[in-house]
Image (cartoon, rainbow, N blue to C red):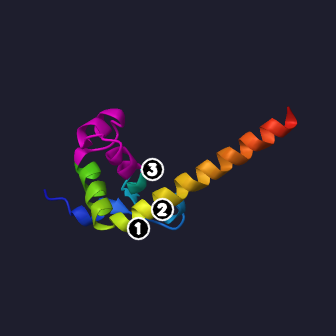
Amino acid sequence: MSVDIGTMIVSSPDFKHGRPHIAGTGITVHRIAIFYKLGYSPEKIVRNYPHLTLAGVYAALAFYHANRAEIDAEIEAEEAEYDRLEQEFLKAKQTTL
């Protein structure tokens, strides 16, 4: 039985803000890309998330590499927003002390 790899990555506007994710899971391609950029091998990702398959992780990585500029830009924007919110929180915390 063959698997159509085009069905392994899906997206829906009602799930995960429309972000592509591994079918049947809540793990987004963005999350896999972040692990990959941290140096995690596909095998290590599957060990950490045993509900994933190696094929699903490789499909997510293929999708990431095919759309790398867009996904990297989204990850960078999220990190910048996180940093901004953290600074805002720390500033508010200092003013209440």
**3D distance between C-alphas at marks 1 and 2:** 6 Å
User: Going 45% across and 50% down the picture, which residue do you hit?
Assistant: 26
State the residue in front, 18 or 75: 75
Judge the density around disc 2: few (<14), some (14-19), many (≥20) Cα neighbours within 10 Å.
Answer: few
In front here: 69 or 56?
A: 69
Residue 61 in magenta stretch: no
Closer to the camera in the image, 91 or 60? 91
> In the displayed image of the protein, which residue is found farthest to the left?
1
SS for callout 1: helix
Q: Residue at x 34, y 47 (%)?
A: 37
Residue segment shown in magenta: 31-54
Q: Position of residue 20 (x, y in %)?
A: 41, 62
Mark 3 nearby-residue class (10 Å; few <14, some 14–19, many ≥20): few
Label 2 sits on a secondary structure element that is helix
Q: Are marks 3 and 1 in contact (CB under 8 Å)?
A: no
The residue labelled by disc 2 is 74
Query: Which labelled disc corresponds to residue 26?
Result: 3
Asked whether residue 52 is drawn in magenta, I would say: yes
Tell me where residue 2 appears, x and y as whole percent.
Answer: 14, 59
Q: CA distance from mark 3 to mark 1?
A: 20 Å
Front residue of this view, candidates 90 and 58: 90
Asked if disc 1 and disc 2 are in contact, CB closer than 8 Å, the reply is yes
In percent of width and height, residue 45 lies at 31, 39
Residue at the disc numbered 1? 70
Number of numbered discs overlaid on the protein picture: 3
Q: Residues within 10 Å of mark 1 (few under 14, many from 20)?
A: few
